[in-house]
Image: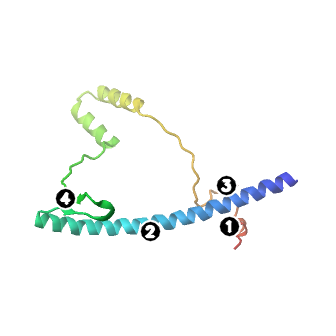
């Protein structure tokens, strides 16, 4: 009986710590998003100014010896399955050959399985603790 109590206590303490960390991470993600949004706006302003004046800006402090300049970079989007499928079918007139090629491509893809925790509404047949149980765990 004591082992069960210890197991329950360990589970409750671990769950409580996990939920606290989850809440902290959500707050940090929100703060990070706000800072990134502000950084994008500031970057747009700096890009306009630097392009208009055709200059670069030398930096001081911990960025001594570096500069901010406007660079033009072109990137291709990643290949997605829908576009690849359409392109192959448009290019190869033989549907069987196109299907064979798409099947071979799919066979070479690597499958990755990851287990993770997710906080979500309980499924109908779930054995998860009730909201009252969680409130008791959190000490509310």
Instruction: Find residue 30 and report its horizontal and vertical position in percent.
Output: 45, 67
CA gap between label 4 and label 3 equals 54 Å
Q: Tag 3 or tag 1, which sits nearer the N-term? A: 3
Q: Is residue 111 above or below residue 75?
A: above
CA gap between label 2 and label 4 equals 27 Å
Q: Which mark is residue 126?
A: 3
Which-is-in-front pick, marks 2 and 4? 4
Which-is-in-front pick, marks 2 and 1? 2
Local packing at callout 2 (Cα closer than 10 Å; few below 14, some 14-19, many 20+) is few
The residue sitting at 16% across, 65% down in the picture is: 50
CA gap between label 1 and label 3 equals 13 Å
Q: Which mark is residue 70?
A: 4
Q: Tag 4 or tag 2, which sits nearer the N-term? A: 2
> Label 4's element?
loop
Task: Identify the residue position indicated by label 2 in the image.
Answer: 31
Task: Identify the residue position indicated by label 1 in the image.
Answer: 131
The residue sitting at 36% across, 65% down in the picture is: 36
Which-is-in-front pick, marks 4 and 3? 4
> Label 1's element?
helix
CA gap between label 1 and label 4 equals 53 Å
> Label 2's element?
helix
Q: Is residue 75 above or below residue 38?
A: above
List the single residue furthest toward the bottom.
Answer: 140
């Amino acid at each position: 009986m004591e082992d069960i109590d210890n197991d329950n206590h360990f589970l409750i303490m671990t769950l409580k710590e996990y939920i606290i960390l989850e809440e902290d991470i959500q707050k940090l993600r929100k703060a990070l998003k706000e800072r990134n949004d502000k950084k994008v706006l500031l970057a747009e302003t700096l890009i306009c100014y630097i392009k208009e004046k055709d200059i670069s800006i030398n930096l001081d402090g911990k960025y001594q010896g570096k500069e901010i300049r406007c660079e033009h970079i072109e990137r291709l989007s990643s290949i997605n399955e829908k576009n690849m499928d359409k392109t192959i079918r448009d290019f190869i007139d033989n549907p069987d050959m196109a299907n064979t090629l798409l099947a071979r491509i799919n066979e070479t893809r690597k499958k990755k399985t990851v287990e993770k925790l997710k906080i979500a509404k309980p499924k109908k047949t779930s054995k998860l603790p009730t909201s009252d149980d969680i409130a008791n765990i959190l000490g509310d």
